[in-house]
Image: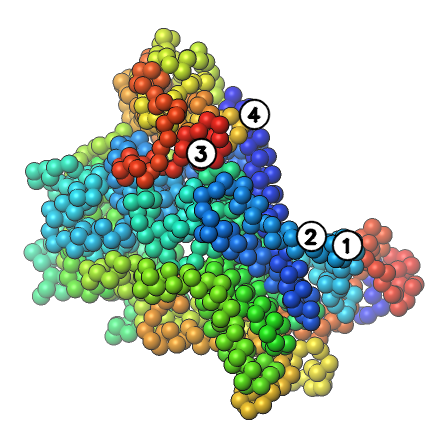
Amino acid sequence: MNTSAHPPSSWAQKSIFVLIIGLILIPFVMGLYQTSRAIGTYWLTFSLRGRLVHETETNKLLESGYPSVRLHAALAVLANPDDVVLNFRLAEAGFYGKRPFIYFIDPRLIPLYQAKTIDAGWKALEKNKIRFILVPPYAMPEIYGTIVQHVLASPEHVSLLYDLEGWRLFRVHDTVRPPLPLPKIVAENFTTHPKAASNWHMTEDTLTDPKGLPYLDTSTGWLHIRPTLWRSSDHTPRLRLFRDEVFYSGVPGILRRTLALTPASINRFEARVIGKGLVRVYLDYGDDRRRHFNAWSRTLIWEGILNGSPQQIMNQFMVPAEYPAPDPNNSSAAASRLTFETVGETALALQSWDISQVSSHTPLLDAPYEPRKRWLVVRSRYSYSFEPPLASQQFTSEKADVHVTNYGSYATELYGPFHLATATKKNLVRISGLFSGTGIIRVSLLYGCSGAEEPTYMHIGEILLTKQAEEKKIVAGVPCPMAWVQPILRLYTGSVSLRPKGANTTLKMDDFRLEGGSAHAPTPESTAYSWQDLPMSQQPYFRFVKEPEKPRFP
Amino acid sequence: MFDLSPGYPLLTLLLFVKSGFYFQYLLVSAYGTGLALRWGLKDADPRLVWSAGLALGPVALAWLLWVMLRVSPGHAPGIYLVGCLLPFLGIIGVEIWRRGNPFAQWRERLRSVLTPLGGPALWLRPLWLFLAGLSAFVFVLCGVTAFLVPLHGNDSLEYAQAARLIANARSSAIYPFVDPFTTNGFYAPWTHPPGYSILLTLGYFIQGNTINAGIIRMCAPFCALFGLIALGLMGEFLKKGAGVIACLLWLLSPLYLHLIIQNHIDPVRIGAFVASVALSLHAMQHPHVRSVIALGIGAGLAHFTHSMGLLTLVLILPVFGVMARTTLLNRIGLGALACGVALSVTGINLLDNLRLYGSPVSDTPLIWNLPEIPIREYLEYSRGINGVYEKMLYGVFKGFSKFIDFGPLYWMALLMLVFLGGHILWSEDKTALKDHGVKMGSRFTSQMLAHLRISLFATPLSPSPVVFLAGIVAIFYLFLFSTLAIGSDLAIKNSRYLLTIQPLIALLAGVGFAFIATLYAQKAHDLFKELFGFLREKSHIRKIFTPWEKIPRSSPAAHEEKPS
């Protein structure tokens, strides 16, 4: 086979050749990695039915479990059209949000940042008609450096509605509520109780179990951690060359302790710390205390940069529903801990901390989203067609007791063509029913299915089912199709994700109600909207002029 | 049922077709720009001209659309769609009128540009094809992903929303968005000129609606494709085979692939920068008024996409001033001319910024001046650049320390330099270096010094493009150090900003690797034949080895040997 006249080359030449081939194969790996990362972020799957290709962008996002988009979808239902949302992230709010909002660098918020008391901060929110606050999980100096942190941690002024992977949605109260009795679940103060410091341990990286003890300065009552991996005993940096990248960092110092919190409850965390550098506080929980650190689930409680002086850090957070409930019979089974994570070259000392329970349940019928991977969307086992109502007709399904039982992880879709009035916010979709089982039922409306444009999903609501017994639940929403889309709607309930896995869900719908058209007088076709004429609270999301002869472009 | 709905495949097809229209717009603008540059710069190398035309075309299109939206806002989208393309169509029409069908001898023309592919050694040809195929595969992978995933990423969504507002208002007067009352709360006090947003606006116009992101997700992949080809052409201009390697090395940076998938601004911005560098190469070798005007337009368009484009002339002009082959007075005058032309392209944006923000370039929102907000500590700690040591390691030399962003390019370039240095030091035949197209190694330093010394008093020596590019890279790092020295983290805080210089580093590394390849061409040729020689027995595979011309064989009996 050798056509070359030259003698066989040496092993060195061959190895160099293999090295070169290996180097030029790197782009393969890089490209595949980036691609899978982009797709994996949104939990998208390549399926034989071509869902990935044919789904709409909005639907892909809604089904992806990406927290920010889900919160904006929830806001579209929760918030009234004139409710202003304070957004600490512009991207999804600007592009996918459907409600008027204020971006956090807006100069209108300067009074908020300059407020000295919580009440003054709340009044600054009131002045801008801010009813909701959406906070990303990463550190924001505009929050931890100013009064905003205290406002967000105050259950009298705001209430936490959602906590999805650290993305938090708060509702600002209309009036300041009287001080709540906040029962403290865990509280430790090392100044008054130095022995509590012996509860704390430290690990230096993700792979090892506790290596040393944190150091308690008994004269001041501060509990110091000394990440010796980054700092030698004389506090000079060491081995810094191998520091992890900040955003994907490892864990130099971990303080761990078992906590007994109620699953799916709202809690308030507060600590008095002194330190410098980037610090994250996590609630970690898992099945086995001895397992690899990365195998634990975690919820971010606080992230920020300490400024070197004693300071209070605080936040409200939601304990995940999967959190292991405390078991009085077997104390060793509770595997959870509070973790202070320092990133890079940092110093941290802790004086006191506590967690108090604000609410034993989540105020909304919602729970942390089950990632798409857990369930499959397959063809529905049950289809139910409705009579298409007239545009001016109020429609109520007379056929009661739609009865669907799901075994395992299957979705149910109920759909039919409906006519809703366009460009008005007076349509009402209301579904009430008897539900039993455990899981989440998502209700959404799909409109604009004419083929001319991409259909748009509107998220109506979600129902969290926690009992096996039948419960009466109601989901309602006010969908507002845009002027230029076909006013044919599809109702689709379904996407039932089950938790715990393998449980059965039964859905009984005894009442399906869709109101539109003449029940609330529709907007005349000739009405032209122009957003400059409307006050900000009533501005539509798009600027459009309702002209039937030119429906294609706003 | 849900998946049997006729809408979905149709919608996907529509999206696909509209994306094709979008691509054709960009392609026509690139072709028209290349032709215009060709007319203006008759003495230029066609590879440089097409390199600049490809990457600058979309930005030029955006600039025209911006002028239309600014001068006469509020018309139907079709008017803008036709109007912004008319100049390019006119150029192409005149070309056809003057020279007949421009695609008549496309094989020959393409070959005249791509002849270097393959290099001196026979074995290189399939290897180059393989490398080009690899680049294409990676690129197509990113493009398909960008088509499939919804628009995400912080900045991408902001630019998309800015474009949506511009498209809905059909006026660029609402840019920048400093009045949140008129934009439903969207507040974006950017000092960037609106180039990228206008390019996305064009996508919305083609799409016909602004409901979904739709085809505008393909803007960055398309522009990145043009930028990639531009880089390859520039590399082929520098040294045979260097372009393909440079393309591959450029695609080695994971951050760049990520930005392509996210439909970020940087593929467009960096493409315009690469085009400006290509024009400056020509201006350096032929420093006359026309070439410098072209350079000024390129730099202005680079600024039109992003504020960082202001840096283009800051990086290029010092090296140009040292190396251009004219008298000192001429060099100063031409530099001033370039600045003037660039200002004529985007000067009005700078004036707008001065009026709105009080400074032409700014990256600081108003509230960050509040003493309550510890923004400086936040930026330092959250980005890992607290302290001088970190600023150096994780700031200036990010390319070496942040593998996850920049890939192995910097280390590969360093290895290549070490290898070349060793080769130069220990090579038995030192004159062999001169036989190759690039002057590198020990002559590099002396040439730089000679340039510096002579350029102050007389006409510089014959300038080397590689030295010119290395000078731009050096000025870039000098700029980084000087911003650090005045206490600003502006240039190092964002990995994307350091990505600006990466194509030039890829180019230089590509030249070096091509140089090494030619040094070892014969040995590698033998090795390649030994490893893959049996493939030549297959006649259909032999066609791959001999793609478009007959290859003279030294021994005709070679392929008649029977396998043992």
Three-letter residue code for mark 2: Gly
- CA separation in Å, label 3 and label 2: 44 Å
Three-letter residue code for mark 1: Gly
Nearer the camera: disc 3 or disc 1 = 1
Could you tell which of marks 1 and 2 lies nearer the N-terminus?
2
| Chain bearing mark 2 | B
- CA separation in Å, label 4 and label 2: 41 Å
Asked if B326 appears above or below A462 in the picture, the reply is: below
Q: Quadrant of residue B443?
A: bottom right
Q: Can residue A347 be seen here? A: yes
The x and y percentages for residue A97 are 35, 39
Three-letter residue code for mark 3: Asn
Q: Which residue is mark 3?
A: A59
Three-letter residue code for mark 4: Pro
Left or right for B131, reference A431 = right
Q: Which residue is mark 1?
A: B100
| Chain bearing mark 3 | A
Quarter of the image with the C terminus of chain B is bottom right
Furthest-top residue in view? A398
Q: Which residue is mark 2?
A: B93
- CA separation in Å, label 4 and label 1: 45 Å
Q: A117 or A485, which is in the foreground?
A: A485
Q: Secondary structure at mark 3?
A: helix
Q: Which residue is mark 4?
A: B6
Q: Can residue A9 be seen here? A: no
